[in-house]
């Protein structure tokens, strides 16, 4: 039985910034490191965490049936095919949208806490009931945002709400960073974002076409394609979550191309 | 069945009771279905606490309409739950002065520490001093002056009751919109120089921004 379970809410305010992708990849990475991890899909109206993990066809029960005592918790938990440490629990059925209350959420999470080291809650977009439910059972949070004005504005709103609910610590992940655009100042810089949000930066994730491929295949990047740039970023985030001190990648260096990278390699490795 | 004619103010911070929950339950015993305004005094209540207040009230068939408190945390929590809330400034200094010399009016200064984030709204019936940034999407307003020890990136309204002598000062003034009394101005397009505090005030019927002078 795990004693000090960390319950982490992954939220953003705006939709489509990469909450679910981060949840899936972080889940796989943490499981790889040997932690028993549960990912709870609180976005059950439009649930697709199961798709990303390739577990859609294995879902039989949801948390709703567990709470109504129609099944046991271990019947509803869907174990990942390759990563036995990772389990998925869908919070509910897309056809019954109104059933979940903050208290239900607390009960589910309390049950999960007994079995797992990590509980990651994939929060729905928006700041309405779905968000409030997901927030009710969380102790800490990761706010995902993109380097664009609207995503940052929504993240700011969400951080305000997290603060009034005493959720600590709240950390930031800046997703879909395009180094070239950032270097040309066509995109908000990292400093622009952290200045406004005033949160510790847990990590950057580079824009990567492989993310789309992996989503469609139902295999998170951190599972099989560890060489893709985004997968490395996700792995670093998982390590930093453990308190490991891993320096952030510098998008400006990433953008300067192969030549510069090669030169840097020469300097560091040989001399 | 029951008509809910008027609002009853319930004070849940009463030293006669060991905790506010007991206090609220006891006070509700004597009320029959009514609309409540909850006076939380200086209690720091989170959203979860307030939801409990609402649940307890509902059990006695009462409806919470609004919340007032001298704690900023409680006020913000109530606002985020969508309840009407009023922030009351407690000024002990002011109280004692009133007793000594009756006709002195002192403007109350409301103080906020921390970032004011998007969607949040701060209001003061006197001056407003903010130690932190006012982010884009946030709004602050005061009947007197606004002083921000940080960056103003959102909307600020000084002299909200019509005092056109009010000013808005910030370490970095980059607002979306500035309002003083009934005047409205859009924020400047270009970024201001770093390291110079600036002040906005009304000069010949228009809002101007000038370097902050210390006199």
Image (cartoon, coloured by chain):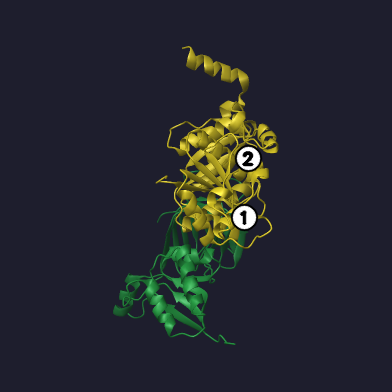
Closer to the camera in the image, B72 or B81 = B81
Q: Position of residue B159 (x, y in %)?
A: 52, 67
| Label 2 to label 1: alpha-carbon separation | 17 Å
Q: Do the residues at discs 2 and 1 belong to one chain?
A: yes
Q: Is residue B65 left or right of residue B43?
A: right
Give me the residue at 53% from left, 35% from top: A29
Q: Quadrant of the N terminus of chain A?
A: top left
In the drawing, does residue A258 fall left or right of residue B48?
Answer: right
The residue lying furthest to the left in this view is: B100
The first of marks 2 and 1 along the sequence is 2
| Nearest the eye: B213 or B157 | B157
Chain coloured green here: B
Q: Residue at x 43, y 83 (%)?
A: B29
The foreground one among A183 and B156 is A183
Which residue is tagged 2? A53
The chain to which mark 2 is attached is A
Q: Secondary structure at mark 1?
A: loop
The mark total stands at 2
Q: Quadrant of residue B162?
A: bottom right
What is the x, y in percent for residue A178? 63, 34
Marker disc for residue A92: 1
**From the viewer's perspective, is residue B70 above or below residue B37?**
above
Whether residue A243 appears in this view of the structure is: yes
Q: Is residue B39 above or below residue A97?
A: below
Q: Nearest the camera: B96 or A125?
A: A125
Q: Check contact, mark 2 vs mark 1: CB within 8 A.
A: no
Q: Crowding near pointer 1: few (<14 within 10 Å), some, many (20+)?
A: many
Q: Secondary structure at mark 2?
A: helix
Mark number displayed over residue A56: none
Identity of the residue drawn at 49% across and 64% down: B77
**x, y (%) of residue A24?**
59, 40
> In the image, which lettered chain appears yellow?
A
């Amino acid at each position: 039985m795990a004693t000090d379970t960390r319950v982490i809410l992954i939220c953003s305010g705006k939709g489509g910034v990469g909450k679910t992708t981060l949840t899936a990849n972080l889940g796989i990475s943490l499981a790889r490191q040997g932690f028993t991890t549960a990912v709870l899909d609180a976005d059950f109206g439009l649930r697709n965490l199961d798709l990303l993990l390739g577990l859609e066809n294995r879902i039989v029960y949801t948390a709703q049936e567990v709470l109504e005592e129609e099944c046991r918790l271990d019947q509803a938990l869907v174990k990942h095919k390759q990563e036995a440490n990772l389990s998925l629990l869908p919070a509910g059925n897309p056809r019954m949208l109104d059933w979940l209350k903050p208290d239900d959420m607390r009960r589910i999470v309390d049950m999960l806490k007994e079995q797992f080291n990590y509980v990651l809650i994939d929060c729905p977009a928006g700041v309405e009931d779905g968000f409030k439910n997901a927030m009710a059972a969380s102790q800490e949070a990761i706010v995902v945002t993109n380097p664009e004005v609207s995503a940052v504005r929504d993240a700011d709103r969400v951080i305000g709400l997290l603060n009034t609910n005493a959720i600590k610590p709240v950390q930031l992940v800046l997703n879909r960073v395009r180094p070239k655009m950032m270097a040309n100042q066509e995109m908000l810089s990292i400093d622009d974002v952290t200045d406004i949000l005033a949160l510790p930066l847990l990590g950057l994730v580079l824009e990567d076409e492989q993310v789309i491929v992996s989503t469609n295949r139902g295999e998170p990047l951190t599972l099989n394609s560890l060489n893709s740039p985004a997968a490395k970023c996700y792995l670093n985030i998982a390590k930093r979550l453990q308190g490991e001190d891993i320096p952030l990648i510098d998008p400006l260096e990433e953008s300067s191309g192969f030549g510069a990278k090669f030169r840097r390699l020469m300097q560091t490795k040989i001399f | 069945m029951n008509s809910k004619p008027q609002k009853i103010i319930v004070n849940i911070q009463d030293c006669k009771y060991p905790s506010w929950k007991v206090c609220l339950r006891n006070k509700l015993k004597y009320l029959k279905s009514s609309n409540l305004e909850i006076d939380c005094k200086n209690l720091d209540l989170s959203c979860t606490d307030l939801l409990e207040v609402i649940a307890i009230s509902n059990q006695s068939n009462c409806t919470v309409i609004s919340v007032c408190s001298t704690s900023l945390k409680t006020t913000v929590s109530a606002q985020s739950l969508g309840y009407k809330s009023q922030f009351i400034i407690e000024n002990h200094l002011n109280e004692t002065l009133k007793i000594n010399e009756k006709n002195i009016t002192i403007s109350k200064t409301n103080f906020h520490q921390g970032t004011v984030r998007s969607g949040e709204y701060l209001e003061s019936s006197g001056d407003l001093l903010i130690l932190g940034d006012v982010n884009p999407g946030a709004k602050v307003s005061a009947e007197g002056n606004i002083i921000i020890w940080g960056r103003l990136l959102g909307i600020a309204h000084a002299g909200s009751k019509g005092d056109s002598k009010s000013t808005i000062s910030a370490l970095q003034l980059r607002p979306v919109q500035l309002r003083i009394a009934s005047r409205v101005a859009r924020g400047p397009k270009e970024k201001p120089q770093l390291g110079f505090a600036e002040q906005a005030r009304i000069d010949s019927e228009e809002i101007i921004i000038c370097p902050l002078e210390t006199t």
